[in-house]
Image (spheres, rainbow, N blue to C red):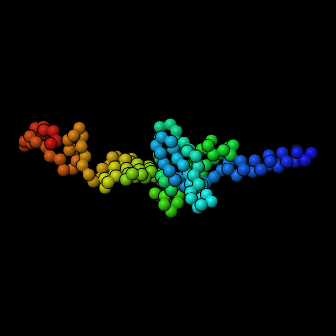
Amino acid sequence: MFAEIINLKSDLEHLKSAFGNALRVGAVEVVDPVKGYRLRIGKDRDGQPFLSPWLPHPESGKTSVPLKTGQIVGLVNPTGDMRQGLIFRGGYSGEHQSPNDDMAANVFEDAGVRITVADGALVITAGGVSVTVNASGLFVNGGRVDHDGRNIGSNHTHGGVFPGGAETGPPS
């Protein structure tokens, strides 16, 4: 009977550990394009970061939006074993704030590009140039507009212009 109690206590301790490790929250500490991510999920006895094992990218299919160092994520370990864990995006933090305060808009912002979908419009902004597509049409503001290497923007010129009904030459 005493042995059974010891076994039950051991099983209970194992279940407590597995349950405690089933869901963890931490910040991305190490990023590797092949291996994935290591999360900072605590500190060791010496005060150094305690890192998770390598975890796979949380993307699948045709998207790639890599996590950034310091970004808050969650780690789900169904068996309590972090080596079998899956990352899910956590939330915003002081270091990684939301690019958007309009809850009716979908916004993607990274690497100097911002894409906004709101009010029936798509707006892409990069380096001082914006492209807007909405029910009224296509609008380009700033920068130069080229087609097949030729300037077709507001400042393009045409050669071969003659008075009357003649055709002009292509944009130069």
Q: Position of residue 55 (x, y in %)?
A: 56, 44
State the residue in front, 114 or 57: 57
Quarter of the image holding residue 83?
Answer: top right
State the residue in front, 84 or 140: 84
- Identified at 68% across, 48% down, the residue is 22
Residue 95, compared with residue 171, is above or below; it is: below
- Identified at 53% across, 57% down, the residue is 92
Side (left or right) of 114 relative to 163: right
State the residue in front, 58 or 131: 58
- Identified at 7% across, 42% down, the residue is 162
Q: Residue furthest left?
A: 162
Whether residue 25 appears in this view of the structure is yes
Residue 140, compared with residue 96, is above or below; it is: above
- Identified at 56% across, 54% down, the residue is 40
Residue 50, compared with residue 79, is above or below; it is: below
Quarter of the image holding residue 79?
Answer: top right
Image mark count: 0
Q: Position of residue 31 (x, y in %)?
A: 48, 48
Image quarter in which the N terminus is found: top right
Q: Position of residue 157 (x, y in %)?
A: 14, 46
Whether residue 136 appears in this view of the structure is no
State the residue in front, 162 or 21: 21
Image quarter in which the C terminus is found: top left
Side (left or right) of 143 relative to 109: left
